[in-house]
Image (cartoon, rainbow, N blue to C red):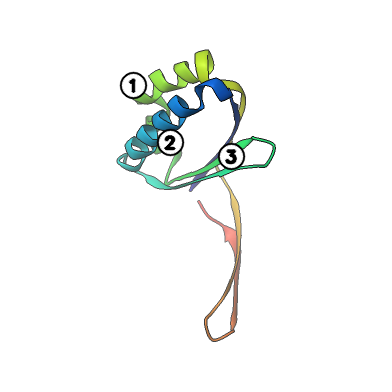
Amino acid sequence: MIVAVFRSRVRAEHLQEYLERGEAMERLARSMPGFVSVKDFVAEDGEAVSIHEWESAEQLAAWREHPEHKRTQQLGREKFYDEYTLYVCDRPRQSRFRRSPAGAVHSEKGRKS
């Protein structure tokens, strides 16, 4: 499992176009081999955070190098972003807690690879 965390601040004057591009990129990512999930959040101060999960580093690299994604990355640097930071975690440690409907507690720890 590979986890990529993308933190960004979008220029307000391009927000609508950015959101439209983002929807197109999410559809494209979901169609790629190895895609697991994506979740997007926006903080009160305007910072956006996306958490992406991929099955392998090779599949994430294929996404990074996809021609349409590359064009959108360049557009992001030229037009959409005031700033961004990307973190890629290639050996994430996982802890999980889940309460079952009956109230029993289930907990897991370990490293997913």
Determine the residue located farthest toward the top in the rendered image: 78
**Residue positioned 64% across, 35% down in the render:** 47
Q: Is residue 47 above or below residue 68?
A: below
Label 1 sits on what residue type?
Answer: Pro
Write down the residue under mark 1: 67
Closer to the chain start, of discs 2 and 3, is 3
Image position of 9 with respect to 2: above or below = above
Q: Quadrant of residue 100?
A: bottom right
Query: Mark 2: which secondary structure?
Result: helix
The residue identified by callout 3 is 49
- The image quadrant that residue 104 belongs to is bottom right
Whole-percent x, y for residue 87 in the image: 60, 35
Q: Estimate the x, y position of residue 52 in percent, counting from the top left.
A: 49, 43
The residue shown at (51%, 13%) is 78
As drawn, the label of residue 60 is: 2
Q: Residue at x 57, y 46 (%)?
A: 91
Residue reaching furthest right?
A: 45
Q: What secondary structure is found at the residue carrying circle 3?
A: strand
Is residue 16 shown to the viewer in this render?
yes
